[in-house]
Amino acid sequence: MTADASTTSSGRLVLLSGGSERLAAGLRESLAARLLTVPLDGLHPHTATSIDRDLAGWPDPVVWVHAGPAPPQPTDATSAAVTVLEAALDAAEAVAVSAERRLVFMFLVPAPGLWRSPQDRVGTVAAAAAESLARTRVAGWSARGWRIATIVYGPHDGLDQAAWQDERQLLRRVPMGRYGTLAELAGVIRFVASDAAGYLTGSTIRADGGWTAYSWIYPYRTI
C-alpha cells in the first residue's frame, strides 16, 4: 500500500517522538489531547490493527507520543539513540500509511549542554541525528504531502531534573532567566502541526529560551 498527497485522506496525524514518559505525560495535559502510544516496531503485525482500532472516531488532528518498547539496543548508548530515532521514523511512516492520513512528524530532542555527562553526550548525538535523519526523508515525504521537523527543548518545568546541570548554572546561561513551561512547548508543537506552518518542513525549531544562541558558546568550560 502506498500513500501520497492525492490518496491520503484530509485528516492530519501528528506524531511526536522523543523525550521521557514524564515529558509525554506533561504534553498530554498541556495539549489537552489523547495520546496514542505505539511501540517502535512498525513492521510488527499487531501495529496496523491496533492503529486502525484506536484511531476510529478520533478528531483531527490525532497526537501520538511514543513511549513504547524500543528495538534491541547496542551497548553504545549513542548508537542506541540513533537506532531509536530511525525506528521512530519507520514506525511513523507505517502509522501514516495504515491510517491514510497526512503526517506531521516531530522529533523532540534536548538542547546540547542541558544534561550532565554522559547523558549530555547521548542527547547531543540524538539532536544531531534527528536533523540528519530529517534530511533523508524530507524529499520523499514532501511528495506525499507529509512534513517533518525537529524541536529542540531547553530546561522546562515538569521535566525530570535529576540529570540536568546545576540549576544556578542553567539559569545563568538562559537569556530569558527562567525555565520554560510545558504549555509553551505545547504551543510550539501546535503551531508546527497547524496549517499555518504548512510550508515548514525539514526545519529545526529551538524552544529553549535562547539557550542555544547564547549558552553553547561556553560548551564544557563552565558547564
Image (cartoon, rainbow, N blue to C red):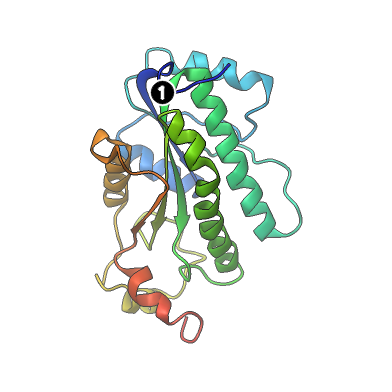
Residue 214 x/y as whole percent: 34, 76
Residue under the image location 50 percent in, 64 percent down:
162
Residue under the image location 42 percent in, 75 percent down:
216
Q: Is residue 88 left or right of residue 156?
A: right
Residue 16 x/y as whole percent: 45, 40
Label 1 neighbourhood size at 10 Å, few (<14), some (14-19), many (20+)?
Answer: some
Choose top left, top right, bottom left or bottom right for residue 187: top left
Q: Is residue 30 visible?
A: no
Q: Is residue 123 visible?
A: yes
Residue under the image location 30 percent in, 40 percent down:
199
Residue 7 x/y as whole percent: 43, 16
| Badge count | 1
Mark 1: amino acid: Ala
Looking at the rendered structure, the secondary structure element under dot 1 is loop
In this rendering, the answer to whether 66 lies above or below 78 is above
Q: Is residue 93 left or right of residue 72?
A: left
In this rendering, the answer to whether 110 lies above or below 91 is below
Query: Which residue is labeled 1 in the image?
Result: 5
Residue under the image location 62 percent in, 40 percent down:
87
In this rendering, the answer to whether 158 lies above or below 71 is below
